[in-house]
Amino acid sequence: MVTARSTAPPTGDLAHMGTYETMAEILTAFRPVMHAMAAAGGSDCEVVLHDLSAPNPDLGHTIAAIENGHVTGREVGGPSTSLGARVLHNQGEDHNAFGYPGFTSDGRQLRCSSVYFRNSAGRIIAALCVNVDLSTVQRARALLDGMLPQPPDDSRDQPNEFFGRDLMAVMDAMVTDAIREIGKPVEQMSRADRIAVLTKLDQRGALQMRKGVESIAARLGISRVTAYSYLDEARNQDAEEAAG
């Protein structure tokens, strides 16, 4: 369960998107659009609508409608992704994102776009996401790699998104990514390294997920109590730096 922070009515670019008060309105308006997008994009194009309208959404069961769910192995009633917790953790920002990378639990790369719908109070109540499996394109490109230049890396400011058949798989992928960013195996990590992993996952909303701290602690080889101690230390340090 995720506790959503209070928000103000949408302003600026967000105000031009319009608002919806219920999921029923959104489903009525966008269910045909989802079908059209999936048909145009082909069998590798997944289109999914997440219901985030509950006061404390259960991220393990957010999918209200989905087309071509075989792309990520999900179905109606299935989970959100790693971005869901981050978005609900800070609803004041514009989280709409286009063409960013995503990864399935079996390692396939996706090209993703997400648009978030708000009510008149500015609260996010739904997300429409498009996820295209790039496997076919990548196999074709592999035949031409010797002739094609490598594209520049302009993805540093774009989010990574992880998909899984359940929320625990999503959590595990998020932890793996944070550990990879530290650049050393867990058994070689120092206390500071483990705190850095916890800080990254806290900022990405992973600790808002059910049993988030327990899962992260197990991957880092520390107790739940130690994980909370490290987390408190990191948060206190951040608060002191912000105040100073």
Image: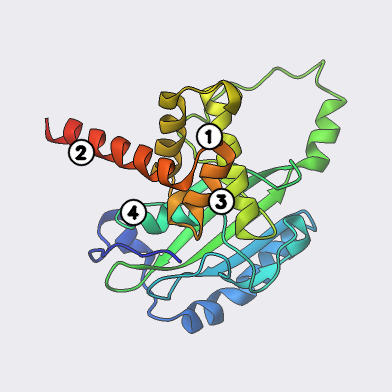
Q: CA distance from mark 2 to mark 4?
A: 17 Å
Q: CA distance from mark 1 to mark 2?
A: 22 Å
Q: Position of residue 145 (x, y in %)?
A: 80, 20
Q: Are marks 3 and 1 in contact (CB under 8 Å)?
A: no
Q: Which residue is mark 3?
A: 113
Residue in view at x 39 percent, y 76 percent: 20
Of tags 3 and 2, which is closer to the observer? Answer: 2
Q: Position of residue 192 (x, y in %)?
A: 41, 25
Nearest the viewer among 134 and 170 is 170
Q: Does the image show residue 114? A: yes
Above-or-below relation of 36 to 189: below
Q: Which residue is mark 4?
A: 90
Q: Disc 3 marks which amino acid? A: Ser
Give the mark nearest the N terminus, 3 or 1. 3
Q: CA distance from mark 1 to mark 4?
A: 20 Å
Q: Disc 2 marks which amino acid? A: Ala
Q: Which residue is mark 2?
A: 239
Q: CA distance from mark 3 to mark 1?
A: 22 Å
SS type, badge 2: helix
Q: Quadrant of residue 100?
A: top right
Sort mark 1 into few (<14), some (14-19) or many (20+) by Cα contacts within 10 Å. some
Above-or-below relation of 119 to 158: below
Quadrant containing the C terminus is top left
SS type, badge 3: strand
Give the mark nearest the N terminus, 3 or 4. 4
Q: Position of residue 113 (x, y in %)?
A: 56, 51
Q: Disc 1 marks which amino acid? A: Ala
Give the mark nearest the N terminus, 2 or 4. 4
Residue in view at x 29 percent, y 74 percent: 120
Sort mark 2 into few (<14), some (14-19) or many (20+) by Cα contacts within 10 Å. few
The numbered disc on residue 178 is 1
